[in-house]
Image: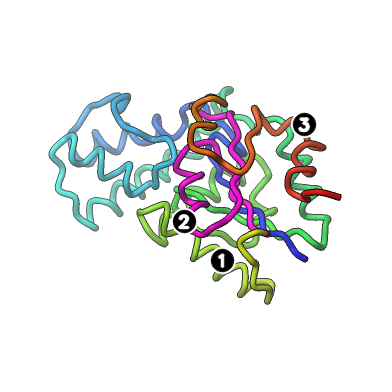
């Protein structure tokens, strides 16, 4: 029986050291004349479109598709340079886990992320991780994170020919939104406390399993593979 792993990016696979926030500020000023530090915006577990919408509403910018695309292009133009900040890093255990998963014929791995696909590629390619993910579900598919699971399952079937039952799907993320997204499709959820939420805070949302980080790769695979 094949298992599908659906990975979140920010706070789960990598930490960007604030690169995303820094890349959002210059185009906000250049395109809309707004100077803001964006510390009042809720980023954790949100899709890019929801984040942009928050910024637009907060600063009285018309929430139009044209403005979204202009702002997105400005953000993506600045993101690569910001990822060279020393705080941007791959989180513990991640390279080993991705390489092991890629080598196992019973594992398929993909992305389920609030990033638009172009942003996901920029972030992961910077760290040499993009090659591990042949497909995924992104903010391009829906601004609602709970809508992304069905897109990921459909693409998994298209890519592998396998219809993955819910009990063989794991959504791996660092926020309560990842847990809710998994619950929406009946999948298993593995919460990791490497983002902005503690083990205690994540536990309150009742994920299938929880880890403080992904450094203990043996424990990770015991959870994914289940009883021997």
Please name the residue shown 69% across and 53% down the image.
Answer: 132
Q: Alpha carbon of mark 3 to alpha carbon of mark 1: how far?
A: 27 Å
* Numbered circle sitting on residue 153: 1
Q: Residue furthest right?
A: 228
* Numbered circle sitting on residue 216: 3
First along the sequence among labels 3 and 1: 1
* Numbered circle sitting on residue 27: none
Q: Alpha carbon of mark 3 to alpha carbon of mark 2: how far?
A: 28 Å
* Number of numbered discs on residues: 3
Percent coordinates x, y for residue 127 in the rendering: 65, 39
Q: Secondary structure at mark 1?
A: helix
Percent coordinates x, y for residue 177 in the rendering: 44, 43
Q: Secondary structure at mark 3?
A: loop
Q: Local crowd at mark 1 within 10 Å, few (<14), some, or many (≥20)?
A: many
The stretch of residues the image draws in magenta is 168-196
Is residue 127 located in the magenta-colored stretch of the structure? Answer: no
Q: In the rendered view, would you say 43 is above or below 186?
A: above
The answer to which image quadrant residue 23 occupies is top left
Percent coordinates x, y for residue 180 in the rendering: 46, 47
* Numbered circle sitting on residue 184: 2
Is residue 187 located in the magenta-colored stretch of the structure? Answer: yes
Percent coordinates x, y for residue 51 in the rendering: 33, 41
First along the sequence among labels 3 and 2: 2
């Amino acid at each position: 029986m094949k298992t599908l792993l659906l990975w979140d990016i920010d706070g789960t696979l990598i930490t960007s050291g604030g690169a995303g926030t820094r890349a959002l500020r210059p185009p906000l000023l250049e395109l809309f004349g707004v100077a803001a530090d964006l510390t009042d915006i809720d980023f954790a577990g949100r899709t890019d479109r929801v984040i942009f919408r928050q910024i637009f509403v907060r600063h009285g910018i018309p929430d139009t598709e044209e403005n979204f695309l202009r702002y997105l292009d400005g953000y993506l133009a600045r993101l690569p340079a910001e990822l060279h900040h020393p705080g941007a890093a791959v989180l513990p255990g991640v390279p080993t886990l991705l390489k092991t998963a890629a080598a196992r014929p019973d594992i398929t791995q993909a992305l389920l992320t609030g990033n638009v696909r172009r942003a996901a590629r920029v972030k992961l390619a910077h760290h040499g991780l993009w090659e591990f993910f042949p497909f995924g579900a992104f903010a391009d598919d829906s601004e609602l994170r709970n809508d992304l699971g069905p897109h990921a399952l459909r693409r998994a079937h298209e890519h592998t020919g396998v219809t993955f039952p819910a009990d063989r799907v794991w959504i791996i993320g660092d926020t309560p939104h990842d847990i809710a997204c998994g619950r929406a499709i009946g999948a298993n959820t593995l919460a990791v406390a490497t983002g902005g939420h503690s083990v205690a805070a994540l536990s309150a949302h009742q994920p299938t399993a929880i880890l403080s980080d992904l450094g203990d790769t043996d424990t990770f695979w015991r959870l994914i593979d289940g009883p021997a």
